[in-house]
Amino acid sequence: MFELCLRTGSRPRFEVFLLLLAVGTPLAFIWSQQLEFGLPFVSRQKFKETGLIHVSKLAPLQPQLESDFLLSKIAGQPPQTRVYDFFIDLARGAPDGVPRTMLVVNGRYPGPTIVANQWDRLVVNVHNNLPNATSIHWHGLFQNGTNYYDGTAGITQCGIPPGESLTYKYIKVSPSVIFMDRLGGNSTQYSDGITGALIVNPTESPLDFPTWDEELVIQLSDWYHDMSEALLLDYFSPEGITGYQGTEPVPDSGVSRFDIRHNSVITQPNRQLMGLVNIGQQDLLARILMCAKFTLQPNKAYRLRLVNTGSFANIRFSIDWHPLLLIEADGTLIKPVLAEAINIAVAQRYSAVIYTNSTHAQNKTFWMRAQIESDMFRYDQVGQNRDIRGILRYELADGLPGDPHSPNPGPGVSNILDANGFTHFQPFIPDPLQTQHGSIT
Ligand SMILES: [Cu+2]
């Protein structure tokens, strides 16, 4: 066709038509992609009113079980193929107590946790039931030789069309303790709930490294009451959110992997609910009922796999009277660092070992805290809540961790510091490339 357009001859009108077609086709393609990406050509107000979705037809979020946070012990099993099926759907849920439309994997938020061993083969069948295209990005996987499965829609793959499926296959998943979240590749579907954890146990653990009895996943995130598409419309609009372009949307609150209140809304405060609670949004009794009573055995060591699957804000995580022994950062084992809290930026992963031997609380229950940091916020979000909490309790303990109004970070451990982006972490196993590089220079 392009050759015909360049040809000069006796049919100029036809060639003009072909030229227009040649130019018009890419334009049409971009336009259709925008639709596919879910960016609606409507005002934000109309989007918010209609949601472009029949909300009443949406299924409610499936509840999570407390046992879902405990990781299965598969380390040491022989290499094998592990198959998962992901069904991506719209749903109606209230992860922070405020109902909204969101996106879910297998009816849940966060999606199911994948646990594999180094050199296992992972096969994930992704079925897209959304009205928009989607894909799964495996943040943290190196994708050596399989970059077409990286899941960045429009870059390494086309989005999975509505109603279609794609199977991601990884042969020999990357070594070490990589922890990942899944992101909806199109637009910002990730912000609306398509996230989960993927954990890869290494074949061998180094000697003299801290040990633990059980492992938990703790997924933390800032949270928005609007669909990300609506937020993007504001963000990209000429007037921006604050009267000028470039101001990122500020979250309304935060949520945690502990949160299994998904079928609840704040008008049902008397249900026995579990989850990190937004202190300051509901009355005291409701808040306490909604807190996760996360039960651990006393006098044991637990490895907490922390990940910030949020969109914008840093999150400061701590547990009253339980210092965090940090042992891993973004999949690299580190020389242990004791910290009162860890400040986790978006998409970062850390592992912390805690010991359930504290005697500081009378009733053996403690506040878990996930503080949404406001450093980068450029405007005040009305009704915002940044104080996200849960309750850690030792087995058979009952009662409350104390005054819910105690100031953050509350009575943590003294004389040790927060770990954050300025903390100098050192790899537990020296990086051979760095060592080699050092010897050369
Ligand atoms: Cu990534």
Image (tube, rainbow, N blue to C red):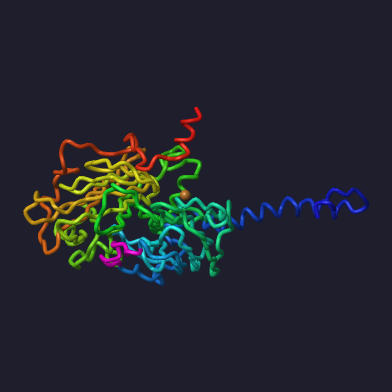
Q: Is residue 318 left or right of residue 235?
A: left
- Magenta part of the chain: 64-74
Picture coordinates of residue 270 (x, y %)? 17, 66
Q: Residue at x 45, y 40 (%)?
A: 432
Picture coordinates of residue 202 (x, y %)? 39, 55
Query: Does residue 250 show up?
Result: no
The furthest residue to the left: 362
347 or 428, nearer to the observer: 428
Q: Is residue 106 above or below residue 214?
A: below
- Considering the whole magenta stretch, tell me its main secondary structure: loop
Picture coordinates of residue 212 (x, y %)? 25, 55
Q: Residue at x 31, y 38 (%)?
A: 420
Determine if the magenta segment contains residue 72.
yes
347 or 39, nearer to the observer: 347
Query: Does residue 356 show up?
Result: yes
Q: Is residue 155 left or right of residue 271?
A: right
User: On the rendered image, what quadrant is the N terminus found in?
Assistant: bottom right
Q: Is residue 126 above or below residue 388?
A: below
307 or 159, nearer to the observer: 307
257 or 240, nearer to the observer: 257
Q: Is residue 230 left or right of residue 99?
A: right
Determine if the magenta segment contains residue 77.
no
Count of numbered circles in the view? 0
Q: Residue at x 23, y 64 (%)?
A: 267
Picture coordinates of residue 276 (x, y %)? 24, 56
